[in-house]
């Protein structure tokens, strides 16, 4: 049975002004142990003080979809939503090396 | 001595038509053991058949700069250059969680 293709996401998220650190804290706390998640990096944008970048690698698209049903993740999304100001960039990828 | 900030890069690279697999192979072969490199993921763009995404995390900006002088990396860059058609996106980040 041929291994499922890996699934990757690269997204730039805008925090409400002055709320970036709060957003990073929420995302970091919730994304520690998610089944099938091979990498979940939260990074500050170096030119826009309100922006962050999230780069994710999953062992399959299904694992990613399942994570959105995890109580901790649902709670984090609800908590973060009021201080998210937008998603300027979002790209789906298929990781092939490095993880 | 306060730890140096991590350094991250997110870039979309265009291969010459039909050369994406060759480009992925060159990049993957050269980026195995680079001092200070915490993550180097090569991924296929899922909408553009000529595009790849490279997401990197380094323990410092200096480590990244030093990697560009490594013989294996220089050779890979020279080998890849003829089949690189462009860099539509390139973002510098400061990873703060997940690595």
Image (cartoon, coloured by chain):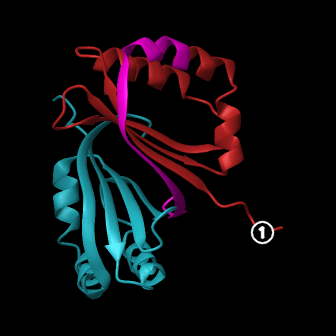
Chain colours: A red, B cyan
Q: Is residue A94 magenta?
A: yes
Image-quadrant location for residue A37 = top right
Q: Position of residue A25 (x, y in %)?
A: 40, 18
In the rendering, at what x and y percent does residue A54 appear? 41, 38
- Magenta stretch? A77-99
**Which image quarter: residue B82?**
bottom left
Q: Is residue A84 left or right of residue A78?
A: left
Q: Tell me, yes or no, whether the highlighted magenta stretch contains residue A93.
A: yes
Residue B71 placement, left or right of B51: left
- Which of the image's four quarters has the C terminus of chain B? top left
Image point (19%, 38%), residue name: A46
Chain letter for mark 1: A
Q: Is residue B97 left or right of residue B4?
A: right
Give B16 or A72, whichever is nearer the viewer: B16
Kindly identify the residue that appears in the image at 48 percent across and 72 percent down: B49
| Residue beneath the point at 40% across and 61% down | B53
- For mark 1, give the secondary structure: loop
Vertical placement of residue A33 versus A78, above or below? below
Label 1: how many Cα within 10 Å (few below 14, some 14–19, many 20+) = few
Q: Position of residue B14 (x, y in %)?
A: 33, 72
Residue B32 visible in the displayed image: no
B98 is higher (above) or lower (below) than B67 = above
Main SS of the magenta segment? strand
Splitting the image into 4 quarters, where does residue B69 fall? bottom left
The residue at which mark 1 appears reads as A2
Which of B13 and B55 lies nearest the eye of the viewer?
B13
- When the figure is inspected, residue A98 is found, relative to residue B19, above or below; the finding is above
Q: Residue furthest right?
A: A1
Question: Is any atom of residue B7 visible in this view?
Answer: yes
Q: Residue at x 16, y 29 (%)?
A: B1
Rendering coords of residue B91 (x, y %): 24, 49
Q: How many marks?
A: 1
């Amino acid at each position: 049975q041929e291994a499922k293709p890996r699934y990757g996401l690269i997204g730039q998220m805008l925090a409400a002004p002055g709320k970036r650190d709060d957003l990073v804290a929420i995302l970091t706390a919730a994304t520690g142990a998610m089944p099938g998640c091979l990498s979940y990096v939260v990074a500050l944008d170096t030119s826009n003080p309100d922006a962050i970048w999230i780069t994710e690698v999953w062992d399959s698209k299904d694992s990613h979809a399942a994570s959105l049903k995890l109580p901790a993740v649902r709670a984090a999304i609800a908590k973060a939503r009021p201080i998210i100001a937008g998603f300027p960039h979002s790209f789906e990828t298929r990781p092939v090396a490095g993880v």
